[in-house]
Amino acid sequence: MSDRRVVFVVFDGFQPLDLTGPHEVFDGAGGYACQVVAPRAGPVPSASGLLVHAAHGVADLDPAGADTLVVVGGRGVDRACRDEELVAWVAAAAAGARRVASVCGGAFLLAAAGLLDGRRVTTHWARGEQLAREHPGVRVDCDPVFVRDGPVWTSAGVSAGMDLALALVEDDLGRDVAHAVARRLVLFLRRPGGQSQFSVALWSRQPATDPVRAAVAAIHADPGARHDIAALAARAGLSPRHLQRRFTAELGVPPAAYVERVRVEAARRALTEGDEPVEAIARGCGFATAETLRRAFHRRLGVAPSDYRARFRSTAAPAGAPPVPEKGRSV
């Protein structure tokens, strides 16, 4: 069986990790032949100034025959979407490909090519509103790390492209190979597509006043402690109603929602780093029962705690997992 052909689309101002991360995943898995195409063959400047050589320009590469088309993102994607020749090439390549994928803002180029209408997609959280505004026929969901809708796969930004590529490898070659590649690349955890882009450190605003800071500090210091509005108000030195109003205004979410997100993050860490039973983790992280934890996981991450641990914890190689042969590389 011949190698599967993966074609990466780049442009001036692309995000280099959107290319190099997935490229390393496919290369490490074996069984893939990767190509890079740009509006013109030759050196292509990335958003950070790193130059990448595109062996092919769209004028000299037949769009037919790609197994997987991967469009990367970056600051230059808006300009790339106005390149009619590039957009037409992407549409033609997608028509013959088995599947199409985008990393980060690459979704804009897929949308410009008419490939996302009616589909559920994701992109970098900072660009979701723009994508929905410019392409109202696209169902934008900026919470997941990646989304699969039929043959179209889209991912969040930067490092999420590696999660997407690992999922594509798993779809082709199986879970053991995908896990072996993740271990070689020293990825702490191969994140499920349904996991939120927004860890507490990313999605939350910073509290602006000392009373709300005191409440937030108490939540993070011990997620499993009692954190109902009365207890938090006592910490903050405010009335429950006053804290509710100020907390929501300063952080953008009400206290109960914030507490649940912090507890889910604490439970995620416990599931991937230790061996405690799910019931014990639920109690330790402030959930009354394992069922309460399960409902919170489904609500936030789209997966059950036991499945999350089974699939995504960092462990030694599973029994019977085939080794991935080392390859020589030139830099």
Image (tube, rainbow, N blue to C red):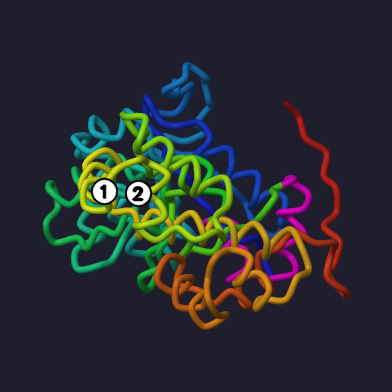
204 in magenta? no
* Label 1 crowd bin: few (<14), some (14–19), many (20+), radius 10 Å: few
Which secondary structure lies at badge 1?
A: loop
213 on left or right of 28: left
User: In the rendering, which numbered label is found on residue 79?
Assistant: none
Q: Which residue position is annotated with label 1?
A: 239
Residue wearing tag 2? 233
Using the image as rendered, state which of residue 90 and residue 80 is in the foreground: 80
Foreground of the two, 323 or 270 = 270
In contact (CB < 8 Å): disc 2 and disc 1 = yes
296 versus 88 height, above or below:
below
> Residue furthest toward the top?
49
What is the x, y in percent for residue 102?
Answer: 40, 51
Looking at the rendering, in which quadrant would you find the C terminus?
top right
User: Which stretch is magenta?
Assistant: 164-186
In percent of width and height, residue 158 lies at 48, 40
* Residue 84 location, quadrant: top left
The mark nearer the N terminus, 2 or 1, is: 2
Q: Position of residue 109 (x, y in %)?
A: 28, 45
Q: Mark 2, residues whose alpha carbon is within 10 Å: few (<14), some, or many (≥20)? A: many
- Residue 116 in view in this figure: yes
Type of secondary structure dominating the magenta stretch: helix
